[in-house]
Amino acid sequence: KQWYQRRVVQADKGGALCIVPKLFIKALEEKKLNDPVRYENIGESDPTSKAHEKLLNYWRFGEDNCYISRDECYDVVGLCEKKNGKQQRPSTSSCFKPRTPYFYGLLKIHKLDPQNLKPGVDIPIRLVTDLSQSVTSRSDKFLNWKYLQSIQEEFCVDLVRDSTEALRWLEEQSKLSKLSKNGFSWDFSALYDNLTPSLVKEALSVAIKELRPQWTDGFTKWIMDLVNHSLDSSFAKYGRNWYKGLVGIPTGGSLSVTLANIAVYYVLRKIIYLNDNIPEELLGLKRFVDDLCGLWTGSKESFELWSDKVNEELRVYGLSIKDKSETAWDFNEPGQDTVFLDIRFNFDANVGLLTDVNIKKTDARVYLHFSSHHPKQMFPSIVYSQALRLRRIINNKETLQNRLNELKGCFLRSGYPRKMVQSIIDDVLTRPRVLEYNRTPNKPPAPVLWVQTFSTVTELIHELASDANKIIQLSPAWKDEKHAIGIVSRRGRNLGDMLLKRKAFALEDTSTSTGTTRCTPITPPGQKKKRGRPCESCNLMSNQKKIISNVTKKTYVTPSGDCKSSRLIYGAQCLLCKIQYTGQTVNKLQTRICGHRSHMNRTPDIEPTEDTDEASLASLAKPP
């Protein structure tokens, strides 16, 4: 009972898991959503159907004007081909139907000192909008992949992709200039909340005009309409109500990072990157979304004057850089470390550039435990990848040895054999430091995918796929395909998924009781029934909060769910003889119940005999 009053919440950074009272985290999330300046409560009515129909109209218009192909129109949003002069109808396949977007909170424990992480402490929270399966998610991913991502890469010349590219830039700056260098780092204050949609669309329009002059006005307008619709459709559900953001852009959208990068560079170009505005003391400036890092050859006083000027000009666009009180305006003189991404660096007068890994104090540093049931080759791979990461970041042998010893202790606490960890670390120490990318050619996906679910891909599966490929090659239509069938693994739910349950907690309605419910509500008297065959499984749902065993007399609490819930243990009781049956399934409960009903329809009535036990009678019991 006490466990059901707790909730496992992931930290915003560092990979830590926090166990907090359910009411505590719920109060923090509701406090954010009830801010009338940032969110609007639009009621219990689901707005996704209207938004989805509007999206389909945009795509119909795009196909009619040859902006997209017929195949793209179906593959992305599921619009079928025109028939008898009628407009394209949407596919009934479930993969094209949007799911419910929702809000969830991440605790920002990295803002606190580890000594202050005690029960009752006030922890800031980041409210994230999960739009991964929203109305526009498939359309947004297509736009980003085919059009906007390449525009971002060409337009935002100050971006770094990862820490490796940042290290390469630092090495180049160390060799180019012999001047004394001071490192500094900036962080935008609440970037996504402060970026206005009008600024984002203005920046994107300018980037398209500069980099894609061959695009027609009609096609550009179609792209902008889809982006605008994506921003307008950034609503999500929490509890029983739907909320829509009033300011900024959503944090969890497929276009959010791309649009934020283009908008930030558009503003910084006006303020800093124009030739007349670049100060002589600024050697360079690099950015990763809202984190900036640069090198300054002047004094600290001159840097602060310039920073204040930049901050004042940013406020014109609704943006700002955090001040020193928030530990994100960081200027460091030679010999002092500057932090950028997971890198700590400084320029020593005698040695030159020194780099180290940046690990936050609240970082859990917890790795997959050695006792878990994963493929054996995965464990040495984890150790090797983490050790190689330190080898890539750190350019000092003594510091590298110390950090590898710390890493070794972390893996030993996770149950890894000491001999295996030590041998991998010794191997990494002998390898050279490499800052180049491994350029592997992109292979096209196999036409047919063999999806392995809930278990590892065994040698037997590879043999079966190989034999199937040989048979397929005998067909004239597939003779040029050497590997027609490709094998991919689909990860099942792990312990983290079961504990976090973000969507379940976000959509949890405290005003309703636990217990199984109908997947579709009963039509009130006087209203027209919905089209389609009613769910036969709904009539069998008990809607009880608990189950009492007839044998052990123990009581079992039933969590909330309906006949579409999956991966569960279920209990069934015969309506005639009250015999109970317990089963388990990874499929939808609806599918399992249909299996029982189908079995009953095919099986004649069986009279109990001495050889017939109660379990078999329960599985065959037919409701009246």
Image (cartoon, grey):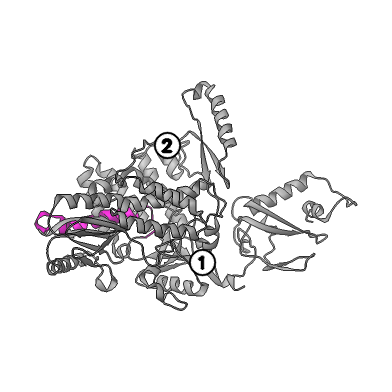
Q: Is residue 515 left or right of residue 406?
A: right
Q: Residues within 10 Å of mark 1 (few under 14, many from 20)?
A: some
Element type at mark 1: strand
What residue range appears in magenta?
A: 250-278
**Residue 610 lies in the magenta-colored region:** no
Residue 592 against residue 246 in the figure, above or below:
above
Instruction: Between residue 590 and residue 83, name the one nearer to us.
Output: 590
Q: Residues within 10 Å of mark 2 (few under 14, many from 20)?
A: few
Q: Is residue 107 at least partly visible in the picture?
A: yes
Where in the figure is residue 30, as x and y percent of width and height?
Answer: 45, 72
Where in the figure is residue 590, as x and y percent of width and height?
Answer: 65, 53
Dominant secondary structure (helix, strand or loop) of the stretch shown in magenta: helix
Residue at the (24%, 65%) spot, across then down? 319
Q: Which residue is mark 2?
A: 71
Where in the figure is residue 618, as x and y percent of width and height?
Answer: 79, 55
Q: Is residue 515 left or right of residue 72?
A: right
Residue at the (54%, 55%) spot, across then down? 494
Residue at the (82%, 59%) spot, across then down? 576
Nearest to N terminus: mark 1 or mark 2: 1
Q: CA distance from mark 1 to mark 2?
A: 43 Å
Residue 294 against residue 92 in the figure, above or below:
below
**Residue 268 lies in the magenta-colored region:** yes
Q: Which mark is residue 8?
A: 1
Q: Amino acid at mark 1?
A: Val
Q: Is residue 162 at least partly visible in the picture?
A: no
